Amino acid sequence: MRRWKRWFLIMVFLGIVLGSTPFPLSPQPIDIILTPEPVNPELPPLPDFVDHLPEVLPPAPIRTPPPQFQGKVVYQVDLPASEKAIALTFDDGPWQNSDRFLEVLDTHQVKATFFVVGQHLELYPQVAQHIVEKGHIIANHSWNHTYHPLSPTQAATEVKKTENEILRLTGVKTTLFRPPGGVLDNGMVAQAKSQNYTIIMWSIDPQDYTNISAPTITQRVLSQAKSGGIILLHDGGGNRRQTLEALPQIISHLKQQGYEFLTLPELLAKSL
Ligand SMILES: [Zn+2]
């Protein structure tokens, strides 16, 4: 046998032996078992609040005056010359038409400060919540709206009981107190000062509680208006139809004059 034939036969033999060996020299393909992708994978549900998130969160209202005003009596606020601002305040509510006052303020996109009487909260508790929900400031105007001298205990009760009721109804801790009738010396203001309240009086008073016409209320407010001023109006304590009627006129005229409407804490925050 010639040499190349012998090599040929050896190679054929080796090919047969190696091809049939139970121990493969090259790895056999491994069966990979692929788990099929779910066609519509179920996503975890979104948390409830996502539905209700506005695209841009409104700024949180300033509720607390700057520390230098705690325990102080304020009639008006000195503002920088660059600012032209004024504050609307409403006393003696909540009352039967208070929600209509809130509607007018909403329509004109104006925020105000409401000094509420504790015992009136018992009658219209939902109004207190509306005041806060709509971004206004709710403030303390005593429980019984009394003018006469009080013992320290009675005065403390007037302030604290109203404070607690506002807190219970709205979750807001009040920081502003307005004495009924503007009486500074019957004990209530001393109590409120000791609790670090800022005492808010006023500089613009059309005396809307004296049953004057809406145009007269408007004219009186406009004639007394100045920057940094605090306007005293009433949404409660009686029929305030004329005040309600005057309110859109007051707002429109003052806006035309370039006034910005601020809540009391906002106005105080801009003080010189
Ligand atoms: Zn009052």
Image (cartoon, rainbow, N blue to C red):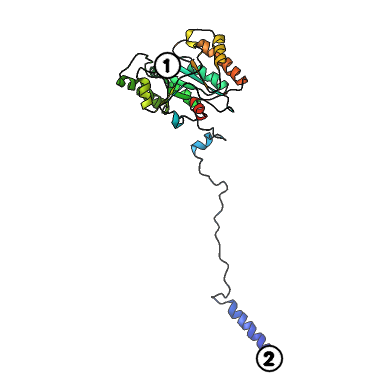
Using the image as rendered, state which of residue 46 and residue 182 is in the foreground.
182
Picture coordinates of residue 262, whole percent (x, y): 53, 25
Picture coordinates of residue 272, whole percent (x, y): 52, 29
Ligand 1, image quadrant it occupies: top left
Picture coordinates of residue 271, whole percent (x, y): 51, 28
User: Which quarter of the rendered picture does the N terminus lie within?
Assistant: bottom right
Q: Residue at x 57, y 9 (%)?
A: 215
Q: Is residue 11 above or below residue 122?
A: below
Q: Name the amino acid, label 2.
A: Arg
Q: Name the amino acid, label 1.
A: Gly
Numbered label tally: 2
Mark toward the start of the polypeptide (1 vs 2): 2
Q: Is residue 17 above or below residue 237?
A: below
Say which mark, if any, is on residue 3: 2
Q: Residues within 10 Å of mark 1 (few under 14, many from 20)?
A: few
Using the image as rendered, state which of residue 150 and residue 161 is in the foreground.
150
Q: Which residue is mark 1?
A: 182
Q: Is residue 15 above or below residue 254?
A: below
Q: Is mark 1 within 8 Å of ligand 1?
A: no
Q: Is mark 2 within 8 Å of ligand 1?
A: no
Q: Residue at x 52, y 10 (%)?
A: 242
Name the mark nearer the viewer: 1 or 2: 1
- Label 1 residue SS: helix
